[in-house]
Image (spheres, grey):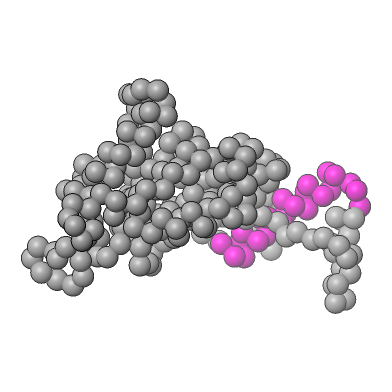
Amino acid sequence: MNFHVMTLFPEMIRQAMGESITGRAIREGYISLDVVNIRDFAENKHNRVDDYPYGGGAGMVMQAGPVYSCYQSVCEGIRKEQGGDSGRKVRVIYLTPQGKVFHQGMAQELAQEEELVFLCGHYEGIDERVLEKIVTDPVSIGDYVLTGGELPALVMMDAISRLVPGVLNNDLSAETESFSGSLLEYPQYTRPEEWMGEKVPPVLLSGHHKNIAAWYREQSILRTARLRPDLLEKAELTPEEREWVKGQ
Ligand code: ADE
């Protein structure tokens, strides 16, 4: 997976991605990160990339020219890396509260791509004309407004990275975790066996794998019913499980 990020705050992206699991994944070559500063494509000697909105109104708007030149430079880099034009249009994700709301299924789908380009906006937005030309996927990370697209891009890259084979030490954990089959993950425990008078559920100490698996499933269903009943409706439950959870 090769991530390309167009931003006015490159250090924000590099710093966050350089830590923890994504940092290790970059160092070990499972993912790559190419961060490009839109300001490097400014068209004036003051390095300005924003201007007043036509029609008036609050705030500034990022200009089409620098964003488009930045995009062309990223595409040129991808072509070189691939040794020519693959003929595939690269996906350009624009982070915006007006986009489709990000979810685990979208992360899984995007993790299949070889290249992903993220466009982070700032100020009041980006000139619509360049968005129409280059953006393939407008995406929001939730119904609230942030100051820019960097944090949403980081959220998305984090969620996508951990689905790339090799990034997690334990690939199984991406399958059993929350949202697989639209269920939340079961509770987890580690040593000590008793903490502040609270014991680990005995079944987990039994060594009986079938009973443990059944308990995990039961707990996932119960948690989802209590914490996210909206998810339970589309969860993959057997008719018996549906009947059972109604009685809980
Ligand atoms: N930019 C500002 N707010 C955002 C959000 N909620 N999701 C994605 N991009 C944004």
Tell me the chief SS of the magenta region: helix
Q: Is residue 50 above or below residue 164?
A: below
Q: Is residue 223 magenta?
A: yes
Is residue 242 visible to the viewer in this orientation of the structure? no
- What span is in magenta? 206-228
Coordinates of residue 3 in the picture (x, y in percent): 45, 42
What residue is at 84 percent from the left and 48 percent from the top?
211
The outermost residue toward the right is: 206
Coordinates of residue 233 in the picture (x, y in percent): 53, 53
Q: Is residue 210 left or right of residue 127?
A: right
Numbered-mark total: 0
Q: Is residue 228 left or right of residue 201?
A: left
Q: Quadrant of residue 175?
A: top right
Coordinates of residue 191 in the picture (x, y in percent): 86, 62
Q: Nearer the viewer, residue 72 or 185?
A: 72
The outermost residue toward the front is: 45
Q: Quadrant of residue 71?
A: top left
Q: Nearer the viewer, residue 120 or 113?
A: 120
The outermost residue toward the bottom is: 196
What residue is at 9 percent from the left and 62 percent from the top?
54
Q: Is residue 193 left or right of residue 88?
A: right
What residue is at 36 percent from the left and 22 percent from the top?
84
Q: Nearer the viewer, residue 170 or 228?
A: 170
Q: Is residue 85 magenta?
A: no
Looking at the rendering, in which quadrant would you find the C terminus?
A: bottom right
Coordinates of residue 153 in the picture (x, y in percent): 43, 54
Q: Is residue 237 above or below residue 2?
A: below
Is residue 138 visible to the viewer in this orientation of the structure? yes
What residue is at 86 percent from the left and 72 percent from the top?
195
